[in-house]
Image (tube, grey):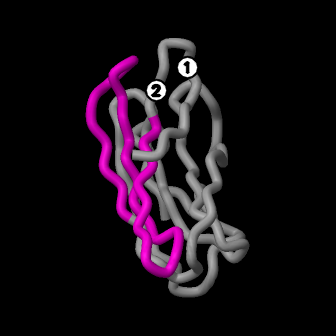
Amino acid sequence: MAHDSDSGWTLGSFSVPNAIPQTALAVTTTEDEGIHVYYGGSTIACWRKSTMLTQVGMTAASAQSSIPGSLVAAISWGTGSGLNICVSFQQAISEVSQYQWVYSVCVAWIDQKC
């Protein structure tokens, strides 16, 4: 189930077809970009899906290697050109990585390792 302020509750609005069973999800919201969902996929990657207010539906971006079944955490702050999202997940047996997505003036995501 998904809720949109314009259309209310709907079925089938969001799916994660490459997620493994019992995958960890991390969700954060932003005023400018909507909802961002980070999850571990079956291809040993941490994926991002986001709802863009200027686009219809979901877009996928920024796959990073990770260990299947590892936890994922996300936090966001700022708005407009000052928007930042930091995502933490396990990238190696003894390493937890953080990636920061910075929203630039040219409306593009820049992957930066924190």
Which residue extends farthest top? 105
Instruction: Report which residue position mark 1 lands on.
Output: 107
Horizontal side of 20 relative to 81 (left or right) equals: right
Q: Residue at x 70, y 69 (%)?
A: 17
**Residue 28 percent location from the top left of the image:** 36, 50
Three-letter code for the amino acid on which mark 2 is drawn:
Tyr
Which residue extends farthest front? 94
Horizontal side of 89 relative to 108 (left or right) equals: left
In the image, residue 107 sits, relative to residue 58, either above or below, namely: above
Instruction: Report which residue position mark 2 lands on.
Output: 103
- Circle 1 sits in a helix, a strand or a loop, which is it? loop
Instruction: Identify the magenta region.
Output: 73-101
Residue 31 in which image quadrant:
top left
Q: Residue at x 43, y 71 (%)?
A: 95
Horizontal side of 75 relative to 71 (left or right) equals: left
Three-letter code for the amino acid on which mark 1 is drawn:
Val
In the image, residue 83 sits, relative to residue 47, either above or below, namely: above
Q: Residues within 10 Å of mark 1 (few under 14, many from 20)?
A: few
Residue 47 marker: none
**Residue 65 percent location from the top left of the image:** 62, 64
Tag 2 and tag 1, C-beta contact below 8 Å: yes
Which residue extends farthest left? 77
